[in-house]
């Protein structure tokens, strides 16, 4: 079998640690060793960027942790830009660490895009889902970043990712067809100053789903024999371990380690070849067997109510107050059936 060219997307994880414990994310629900990328690993990755800069189009400085926890994050971005001036460099942050000094570094940096997350139908629900976060602080940080960038006349594009939920009472087929959208409490705050990226909360592969927090519902769909992630993206975790995609946040499927092997050799190595062949044959290894990319999607349905999370009513202009949540009433038989099915797998 002929070797594949180097992938167009390289993901680099500055930090696998996170300052939050989000209930809809493996990083917040699965206990595994976490840390910061050391100089030796980063230097090895930087050599790979230099070696394959003609193939690499996008570099994502993020995987499962909070990148801004790494004290040398902006130095890493600068060094990558120096060896690959044409790459599109992006990062993702939960926004808690965007203090004034950090915002100034973001604006002065070589980042092309920074993505920040706020979830749910209200500030209170966002704080509830994103455990250890402070919605008002994130909102203030993001508004200040937008204002500071405008005054400076420069800065990266700002995207706002928002995870929304399938609700009890929703017609699942119709809701999925309509797609997730950013809720009004977010769009009223940020208008057209950001680009919105809305998705529905799904069960990640190798994720602990707290039964007191969520039910599960599975959408209809077919198993697929192809996955773009193993064709066009390679990911280096903070400890140097290479994993096949952005959904493996707990290193369940190590492909190799940049400390001991070149990325192109890992990319064309036995582990990657076996994984691609298994997906093509629909014989999914763990954790692909629970992945929404190749299997029918499994969504998280919240069990909480407005009272449960003690959300005040009314939408504050700066996001400090919460707007009422919509009623939850997804068909109980559908939830019970799907939850039983998924628990048996």
Image (cartoon, rainbow, N blue to C red):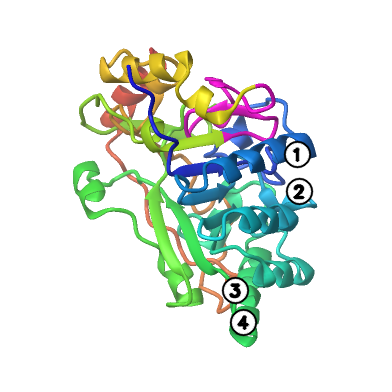
Mark 1 and mark 2 residues within 8 Å of each other at the beta carbon: yes
| Residue 113 in sight in this render | yes
First in residue order: circle 2 vs circle 4:
2
Residue position marked by numbered label 1 in the rendering: 36
Mark 4 and mark 3 residues within 8 Å of each other at the beta carbon: no
Q: Quadrant of the N terminus?
A: top left
Callout 4 secondary element:
helix
Nearest the viewer among 211 and 22 is: 22
First in residue order: circle 3 vs circle 1:
1
Give the Cα separation between the discs numbered 1 and 4. 30 Å
First in residue order: circle 2 vs circle 3:
2
Looking at the image, is mark 1 or mark 4 nearer the viewer?
A: 1
Q: Quadrant of the C terminus?
A: top left
327 lies above or below 301: below
Callout 3 secondary element:
loop
Q: Residues within 10 Å of mark 4 (few under 14, many from 20)?
A: few
Q: Is residue 312 left or right of residue 192?
A: right
Residue position marked by numbered label 3 in the rendering: 155
Stretch of the chain drawn in magenta: 236-260
Residue position marked by numbered label 4 in the rendering: 147
Give the Cα separation between the discs numbered 3 and 1. 25 Å
Main SS class of the magenta portion in the image: loop
Nearest the viewer among 22 and 145 is: 145
Mark 2 and mark 3 residues within 8 Å of each other at the beta carbon: no
Magenta-span inclusion, residue 251:
yes
Callout 1 secondary element:
loop
The x and y percentages for residue 72 are 78, 52
Residue position marked by numbered label 2 in the rendering: 70
First in residue order: circle 1 vs circle 2:
1
Q: Residues within 10 Å of mark 2 (few under 14, many from 20)?
A: many
The x and y percentages for residue 305 are 48, 48
């Amino acid at each position: 079998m002929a070797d594949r060219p180097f992938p167009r997307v390289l993901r680099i994880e500055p930090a696998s640690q996170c300052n939050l414990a989000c209930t809809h994310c493996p990083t917040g629900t699965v206990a595994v060793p976490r840390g910061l990328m050391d100089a030796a690993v980063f230097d090895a990755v930087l050599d790979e960027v230099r070696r394959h800069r003609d193939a690499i189009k996008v570099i994502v400085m993020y995987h499962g942790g909070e990148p801004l926890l790494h004290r040398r994050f902006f130095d890493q971005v600068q060094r990558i830009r120096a060896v690959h001036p044409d790459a599109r460099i992006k990062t993702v942050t939960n926004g808690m660490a965007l203090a004034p000094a950090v915002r100034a570094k973001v604006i002065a940096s070589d980042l092309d895009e920074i993505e920040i997350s706020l979830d749910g139908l209200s500030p209170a629900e966002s704080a509830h889902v994103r455990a250890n976060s402070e919605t008002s602080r994130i909102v203030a940080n993001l508004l200040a970043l937008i204002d500071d960038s405008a005054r400076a006349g420069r800065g990266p594009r700002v995207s706002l990712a928002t995870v929304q939920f399938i609700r009890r009472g929703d017609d699942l087929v119709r809701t999925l067809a309509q797609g997730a959208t950013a809720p009004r409490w977010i769009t009223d705050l940020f208008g057209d100053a950001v680009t919105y990226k809305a998705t529905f909360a799904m069960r990640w592969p190798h994720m602990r789903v707290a039964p007191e927090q969520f039910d599960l519902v599975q959408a209809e769909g077919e198993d697929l024999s192809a996955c773009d992630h193993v064709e066009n993206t390679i990911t280096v975790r903070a400890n140097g371990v290479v994993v096949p995609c952005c959904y493996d946040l707990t290193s369940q499927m190590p492909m190799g380690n940049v400390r001991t092997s070149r990325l192109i050799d890992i990319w064309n190595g036995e582990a990657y070849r076996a994984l691609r062949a298994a997906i093509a044959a629909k014989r999914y290894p763990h954790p692909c067997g629970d992945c929404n990319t190749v299997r029918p999607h499994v969504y998280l349905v919240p069990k909480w109510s407005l009272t449960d999370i003690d959300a005040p009513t009314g939408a504050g202009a700066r996001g400090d107050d919460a707007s009422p949540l919509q009623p939850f009433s997804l068909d109980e038989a559908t939830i019970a059936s799907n939850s039983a099915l998924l628990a048996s797998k």
